[in-house]
Structures are given as structure tokens and as C-alpha cells.
Image (cartoon, rainbow, N blue to C red):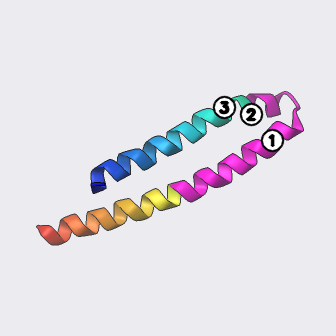
Amino acid sequence: MTDSLEVLERFNEIKSLVESLELDAHKNATGVAAAGLRLRKGMRLIKIRAGDLIKITVERDKTLKRKK
């Protein structure tokens, strides 16, 4: 997989995770505790995936600078 495709795929994965948690956020806002648990679990996963994406983009940028 090329670097640019990997960046876009990782970003789209994060975007999908956020969208999938929207219903749980609404349910938790109305008092459903189980939805809050699912939301927190999903947010921790988003945090991990965002960190992975940051690492990939930093390495990609370093590689591009070296090629110049």
C-alpha cells in the first residue's frame, strides 16, 4: 500500500468510528449508562488510531523531506 493511500484509509477509519459512536453519544446524553460505556470504549480506540495516523504522517513527511 502506498503511503498516501494508507493515510487516507486510516483517516477514513477514524471518521467511520466517530460516525458509529454518534448514536451512543445521543443515547448517553438522554441517560443510557451502557451507551456511555460504549462511547468511552470507542473514544479510547479513536485516540489510539489517531496516534497511529500521526506517526504515519510524521514518518511520511520525514521521508518526503529526505527525497528533496
Tell me what residue is drawn at x 58 percent, y 41 percent. 17
Does the residue at mark 2 contact the one at mark 3 (Cβ under 8 Å)?
yes
Cα–Cα gap, marks 3 and 1: 11 Å
x, y percentage for residue 32? 87, 33
Disc 1 marks which residue? 36
Q: For mark 3, give the secondary structure.
A: helix
Say which mark, if any, is on residue 24. 2
Please state which of residues 36 and 9 is positioned toward the viewer in this rendering: 9
| Label 1 crowd (10 A; few <14 / some 14-19 / many >=20) | some
Q: For mark 2, give the secondary structure.
A: helix
| Label 2 crowd (10 A; few <14 / some 14-19 / many >=20) | many
Give the left or right position of residue 64, taking residue 36 as reference. left
Number of numbered markers? 3
Q: Quadrant of residue 1?
A: bottom left
Disc 3 marks which residue? 22
Cα–Cα gap, marks 1 and 2: 7 Å
**Which residues make up the magenta segment?**
26-49
Q: Amino acid at mark 3?
A: Glu
Does the residue at mark 1 contact the one at mark 2 (Cβ under 8 Å)?
yes
Q: Amino acid at mark 2?
A: Asp
Q: What quarter of the picture does the C terminus occupy?
A: bottom left
x, y percentage for residue 7? 36, 51
